[in-house]
Image (cartoon, rainbow, N blue to C red):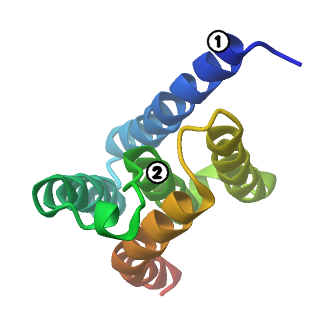
Amino acid sequence: MPSYQTLDNIADAYIPALAILCLCLLIKQFIARDWQRLLREGGLFVMGLVVAYTIMFVDNALLLWPQFNMDYSTHTAVALVLVITLWVMKNSLQGIWSVFLFVSLLGYFLLMLYQQYHSVADIISTSLVVGALVLPLAGKIQNKELK
């Protein structure tokens, strides 16, 4: 089994890797001058991150999660936003990548549990709140691409 530090390095690399992939796909759309898609998917990328960090700031100010003996997981929130954004961008990713994204997210959640960064309740509660705010926007963007 890899050491705690090795697993920590893997966990630390996950979100930047997803963000770089998002940015590369947005740059690809910029180069292709696919302005509508760039605005929709770039908007989802930015708005999703705004949601994740706004909830973090609100939680820090009001201590919402601690009232339930939990912790808002910014790592969960940002990873979820990036995976949702990449899923919307899936036309650029081709087939198996969509499955890989969700499997990688599940693996990241399991790694956070194994490393004891967060509890199951932290990850689930954060995912439910962030997902409830970001998924409707992602759905609207996805529906516009299908038309």
- Left/right of residue 76 with respect to residue 106 in the rendered view: left
Judge whether 49 appears above or below 84 on screen.
above
* Residue sticking out furthest to the left: 61
Mark 1 or 2, which is nearer the eye? 1
- Left/right of residue 133 with respect to residue 2 in the rendered view: left
Name which quarter of the figure residue 13 lies in: top right
Name the disc covering residue 38, or none.
Answer: none
Of the pair 136 and 29, the residue shown nearer to us: 136
Q: Residue at x 25, y 62 (%)?
A: 51
Q: Quadrant of the N terminus?
A: top right
What crowding class fits label 2: few (fewer than 14 Cα within 10 Å), some (14-19), or many (20 or more)?
A: many
* Badge 1 element: helix
Q: Where residue 47 appears, x then y in whole percent? A: 24, 61
- Residue holding disc 2: 82
Q: Residue at x 53, y 30 (%)?
A: 17
- Residue holding disc 1: 5
Q: Are marks 1 and 2 in contact (CB under 8 Å)?
A: no
Q: Residue at x 32, y 42 (%)?
A: 30
Of the pair 75 and 59, the residue shown nearer to us: 59
Q: For the residue marked with disc 1, what is the amino acid?
A: Gln
Judge whether 44 appears above or below 78 on screen.
below
Q: Residue at x 58, y 53 (%)?
A: 119
Name which quarter of the figure residue 59 lies in: bottom left
Q: For the residue marked with disc 2, what is the amino acid?
A: Leu
Q: Where residue 76 appears, x then y in whole percent? A: 48, 51
* Badge 2 element: helix
Judge whether 17 appears above or below 45 on screen.
above
Rounded to the nearest angstrom, the CA distance separating label 1 from label 2 is 24 Å
Of the pair 107 and 139, the residue shown nearer to us: 107
Of the pair 57 and 34, the residue shown nearer to us: 57
Judge whether 145 appears above or below 83 on screen.
below
Q: Where residue 125 appears, x then y in whole percent? A: 47, 70
